Amino acid sequence: MSDVRAPVLLRAEGLVKTHHGEGAPAHAVRGVDLTVTRGEFVAITGPSGAGKSTLLHLLGGLQRPDEGSIRLDGRCTDSYSEARWAEERRSGIGIVFQFFNLVSNLSVADNVELPALLAGRSPKQARAEREALLAELGLQGKERSMPGELSGGEQQRVALARALVNHPPLLLADEPAGSLDSKGTREVMRLLSRFHQRGQSIVLVTHDARLASAADRVISFFDGRIVDDAELDGTTPSRGPGISGVLELRD
Amino acid sequence: MRLPLLALLARGPAHGYELKQDLEQLLGSAYPQPNVGQIYVTLGRLEKSGLIEGEEVEQTGRPNKKIYRLTDAGREAVSVWFQKPEDEPRVRDEFFMKLALAPQTGLADQIALINKQRRQYLNTMRNLSKLAAAEGRDNRIAHLLIEGAMLHLQADLDWLERCQEELEELE
């Protein structure tokens, strides 16, 4: 689908994941092949329960597939231990979640600096990265706040700063606007677009088409499978009224 | 175009080009730019039907311009317009017809139809996002117009998703 010259950042092949809960087994991911090239912004959309979050968790090593293989930057992850995946999530992959998952008893500054320190940065470097990101995300003056004192939109921006503090090649976002109002959603959309324009590779899971339309490529996920994979080029076929038709005020 | 022009004239007299500019400024870049010729034609018709009246104003060194004002009948027409609720937006009935009829023809696949339609909507959604980003932050009316269009599209996309869930089960 994407530019053949761009280097592949992530390649998943034949992923299968079945959840064995109380009832019948749930086939969350049923044979998924997915390639993401460097710099690409891919959105995965579909109804709730389609398995799209499970897919994202497989890509980030938060869950392990029953079958299939994932390569990150050419490295095969199949034999990765939990510890190796945790390391990958500190420096190779940033993740943001619907409910932010900030550490509630750490300040905003500490939440953002912690992964940098864990990755071996000096306190001075961690602090500089944190300052730059919080400024970029419009959170100056909130360094000493606790997550609980912030609005949902602000907490998600802190989570974004935390995810990006080690400059991971890949950002995974799981319904990042799922618990935000429409203003917060627009804000997340604007920020993801901005980081993408600077070359950040992003895989976004969302049921919100507005958010998905910020991506270059939208994958429709149904019942554990990819049913469509479309490049958005921002052009609509000329036969349709397209954008002006949607906006036309009737006479 | 008739009633928006009348409504603009309810504020006070204006000439055609002024009305075009006011409309553009109010609605922003998202709205298809009104054609100045169309505005003059509409103003001519409104004058003929007695809803507005025009007065030629001489200008030195330039052609006369015509200043229009609202008549009592015109003011009444604007009031009636505001009083009446509008029809609901149309359902995408042409697409629905394709979806309903496809299996019987053997000429198209329902899921392929849905996927094609979804791509179209997503591309339009992307264009709307770009327009929203380009529009000045303080033009609230323009932003509301774009947001309204996006919410309509979101609903259409949700409905496509419902169709897909329902029809994939049958397969």
Image (tube, rainbow, N blue to C red):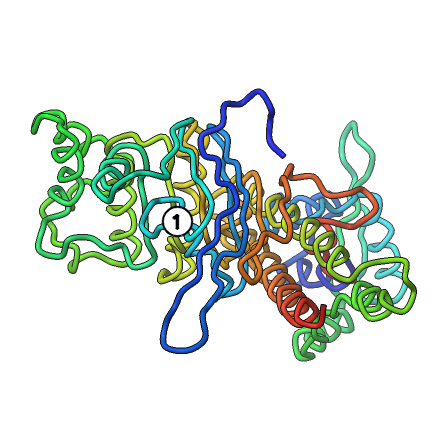
**A199, above or below A145, in the image:** above
**A7, above or below B136, in the image:** above
Residue A134 in sight in this render: no
Subunit ID for the residue under disc 1: A
**B74, above or below A175, in the image:** below
Residue A236, position in %: x, y?
73, 43
Q: Using the image as rendered, state which of residue A68 and residue A53 is in the foreground.
A: A68
Image quadrant where residue B84 sits: bottom right
Extreme residue toward the top, this view: A5
Alpha-carbon neighbours of circle 1 within 10 Å: few (<14), some, or many (≥20)?
many
Q: Quadrant of the N terminus of chain A?
A: top right
Residue B170, position in %: x, y?
71, 72
In this rendering, position of residue B24 left or right of residue B59: left
In this rendering, position of residue A177 left or right of residue B97: left
Residue drawn at x 13%, y 40% as measured from the top left: A114
At label 1, the amino acid type is Leu
In this rendering, position of residue B90 left or right of residue A107: right
Name the secondary structure under disc 1: helix
In this rendering, position of residue A209 left or right of residue B168: left
Q: Quadrant of the C terminus of chain A?
A: bottom right
Q: Which residue is mark 1?
A: A58
Residue drawn at x 74%, y 54% as measured from the top left: A245
Residue A9, position in %: x, y?
45, 30
Image quadrant where residue A166 sits: top left
Q: Across the whole image, how many numbered discs are drawn on residues?
A: 1
Residue drawn at x 62%, y 58% as measured from the top left: B149
Residue A98 in sight in this render: yes
**A233, above or below A43, in the image:** above
Q: Using the image as rendered, state which of residue A54 and residue A163 is in the foreground.
A: A54
